[in-house]
Amino acid sequence: MNFCFFDVFLFFTVRLLKFGLVGISGMLVDFGLTWLCKEKLKWNRYLANSIGFSAAVVNNFLINKYWTFSDSAVHDTPKQFTSFALIALAGLGLNNLILYLFHRKVGLNFYFSKLIAIAIVFIWNYFANIYFTFKVA
């Protein structure tokens, strides 16, 4: 195969943009459910955060599988979801740690802290999923 640098760059740029758009949809799911559970249902903020984050994982997996990484060499959906969920679980731990540190220790607003956590976990999720979940043929 004869790939030029521009083709490879374009391929990865488009994929990163798609992953980012999926991430935005997941962020809306995450924030929406977190807000609902924390503010309206008066649940513990970390439980609410975990529920929002988990719903976003399912949302993001489905859209990423069938849109962002539709050319993946792996077609075993249960295996992919397991990998995606384990990466997301590690991301959830990282998300809660960052949320705790920025909100409780640094004193930033809860939702601003959550935004910082989402940005950091986005980077983790992207590279971990390229390597483990959505390998290209």
Image (spheres, rainbow, N blue to C red):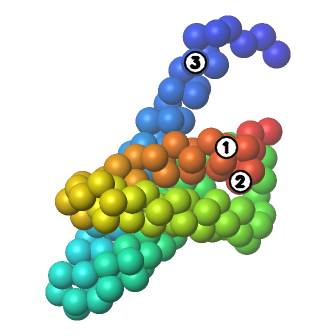
Residue 6's disc is none
Q: Are dots 1 and 3 in contact, CB under 8 Å? A: no
Furthest residue toward front: 105
Q: Dot 1 corresponds to which residue?
A: 130
Camera-side mark, 1 or 3? 1
Type of amino acid under label 3:
Phe
Quadrant in which the N terminus is drawn: top right
Determine the secondary structure under disc 2: loop
Quadrant in which the C terminus is drawn: top right
Residue 51: quadrant of the picture: bottom left
Above or below, comparing residue 122 to residue 93 in the picture: above
Question: Residue, x 28% and y 84% (percent of image)?
Answer: 37
Determine the secondary structure under disc 3: helix
Type of amino acid under label 1:
Ile
Above or below, comparing residue 131 to residue 54 in the picture: above
Earlier residue among tags 1 and 3: 3
Closer to the camera in the image, 94 or 21? 94
Q: Dot 3 corresponds to which residue?
A: 9
Question: Residue, x 63% and y 19% (percent of image)?
Answer: 8
Q: Position of residue 42 (x, y in %)?
A: 22, 89
Locate residue 62 relative to residue 28 in the image: left or right.
right
Type of amino acid under label 2:
Thr
Question: Residue, x 30% and y 54% (percent of image)?
Answer: 106
Question: Residue, x 26% and y 71% (percent of image)?
Answer: 32
What distance separates the C-alpha of mark 3 from that of mark 2?
21 Å
How many C-alpha atoms fall within 10 Å of the one at disc 2: few (<14), some, or many (≥20)?
Answer: many
Residue 47: quadrant of the picture: bottom left
Q: Dot 2 corresponds to which residue?
A: 133
What distance separates the C-alpha of mark 2 from that of mark 1?
6 Å
Furthest residue toward left: 40
Closer to the camera in the image, 15 or 91? 91
